[in-house]
Image: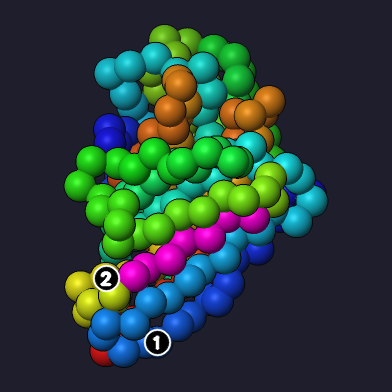
Amino acid sequence: GQQLNQSPQSMFIQEGEDVSMNCTSSSIFNTWLWYKQDPGEGPVLLIALYKAGELTSNGRLTAQFGITRKDSFLNISASIPSDVGIYFCAGRQGQFYFGTGTSLTVIP
Amino acid sequence: GAVVSQHPSWVICKSGTSVKIECRSLDFQATTMFWYRQFPKQSLMLMATSNEGSKATYEQGVEKDKFLINHASLTLSTLTVTSAHPEDSSFYICSGGVQAKNIQYFGAGTRLSVL
């Protein structure tokens, strides 16, 4: 099925730095979701977005539903080692579509 | 809330045998359950979508006779890999869909190794 364009593909950052990643699509969505997957585990839901322009936070994480409804952004502030993992976006319009993932490595 | 239990978490089997993976929504009713396959360092690849009480809808290229899906109740779906071969070795993940919230909640995944 269709996959969303997610960037960057991987990130290596110092502990304490902020992180930004985004997801884009050629189609509009009525829902955007952000998940985190640890090695050997299933994805865990971080944030769900339902309205264009919506900005939602979950602790140090903030995600936004793009105005065009074709993109979404996830920011992580003051990264810590346990933020390490793969982050996936997902959009829904009828079906669910998943991003290609962003692998985050945090260097202590 | 919204917990999905998947087991086994890891299974090793001999080539030619069948393996069953269970997916249960513990605290919600999943009208739709999804089964994914994931290769190392890659995204989720949807295999099939199942609705309670009806036949699963398989994605193109997924053999329905090889990957049998049963969704007998609103809280249980099973995936049976029949006559498994080494190329079926992979990480399989299920999820339960909450229609009203447009959200999928994932199980912890099953690592299948076929010898």
Q: Is B37 in front, or is A55?
A: B37
Disc 2 crowd rating (10 Å Cα; few below 14, some 14-19, many 20+) is some
Q: Is B99 in front, or is B43?
A: B99
Residue A6's x, y, as percent?
32, 38
Which residues are the magenta region? Answer: B76-82
Q: State the SS at label 1.
A: strand
Residue on which disc 2 sits: B88
Q: Does residue A41 appear in the picture of this structure?
A: no
> In the figure, is residue B26 to the left or right of A21?
right
Q: Is B64 in front, or is A60?
A: B64
Q: Report the residue at 51% width, 17% height from top.
A: A30
Disc 1 crowd rating (10 Å Cα; few below 14, some 14-19, many 20+) is few
- Chain letter belonging to callout 2: B
The colour style of the image is rainbow
Task: Decide whether residue B58 is among the magenta residues.
Answer: no
Residue A17's x, y, as percent?
50, 52
Q: State the SS at label 2.
A: helix
- Chain letter belonging to callout 1: B
Q: Quadrant of the N terminus of chain A?
A: top left
> In the figure, is residue A74 to the left or right of B67?
right
Q: Give the spatial CA distance, label 2 vs label 1.
A: 11 Å
- Figure quadrant of residue B19: bottom left
Q: Report the residue at 63% width, 29% height from top.
A: B99
Residue on which disc 1 sits: B12
- Figure quadrant of residue A91: top left
Image position of B41 with respect to A44: above or below: below
Q: Main secondary structure of the magenta part?
A: strand
Q: Does residue B26 appear in the picture of this structure?
A: yes
Residue B114's x, y, as percent?
30, 83
Identify residue type, mark 1.
Ile
Residue A67's x, y, as percent?
47, 11
Q: Report the residue at 53% width, 60% height from top.
A: B78
